[in-house]
Amino acid sequence: MLTEKEFIKAIEENQQIIFKVSNMYMDTKADREDLFQEIMLNAWKGIKNFKGDSKFSTWLYRVALNTSISFFKKDKKEQEVMAWEKTRLSVAEASGIETEQLAAMNKAISELSGIDKALVMLYLEDYSYQQIAEVIGITANHVGVKMNRIRVLLKENSKKHLSK
């Protein structure tokens, strides 16, 4: 178990994880701040469960995603029209993907379930299936199966949004 000082240092070193997850799940600044605080609270409450079997960042991702999904479900009515603005790929990063195609893909991603969004976010951050499995708490094979299904769904939904 980490001491309070070690916990604070580890959080400071990995706070970008909390920002990314908060930005992905919440649209407004106030909601992102609320979620950030909720994640911090749950991390502090759950630090006694961190045994060091995985990296702190992996454990923090798991806490952040689980908190976000619960938070998102509680507030689902308000979040149905959620923007994914802060975690979207920028046009510059996409290099070669047309703006319209990027917008269609982002719209399709925003329509995914909480877990599927988490999988896509981690995948876009170049996490391996094994690393994603550790964060999400499922097997690497299950990650592969889910990612294949997500790819098909995103392809279909992107085409649908392009034709609108």
Image (cartoon, rainbow, N blue to C red):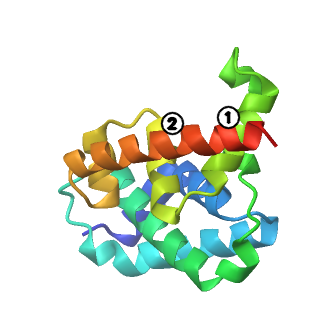
Identified by mark 2, the residue type is Leu
Q: Is there a contact, CB below 8 Å, between mark 1 and mark 2?
A: yes
Left/right placement of residue 62 relative to residue 20 reads left
Quadrant housing residue 21: bottom right
Label 1 element class:
loop
Which image quadrant is residue 148 in?
top left
* Dot label at residue 124: 2
The image shows residue 70 at horizontal and vertical percentages of 50, 78
Report whether 32 appears left or right of 149. Answer: right
Q: Is 31 or 84 nearer to us in this picture? A: 84
* Residue sitting at x 73%, y 48%: 86
Residue at x 54%, y 70% (from the top left corner) = 68
User: Does 92 appear above or below 113?
Assistant: above
Where residue 145 appears, x then y in whole percent?
Answer: 29, 46
Q: Residue at x 17, y 56 (%)?
A: 53
Image quarter of the C terminus: top right
Q: Position of residue 135 (x, y in %)?
A: 33, 55
Q: Quadrant of the N terminus?
A: bottom left
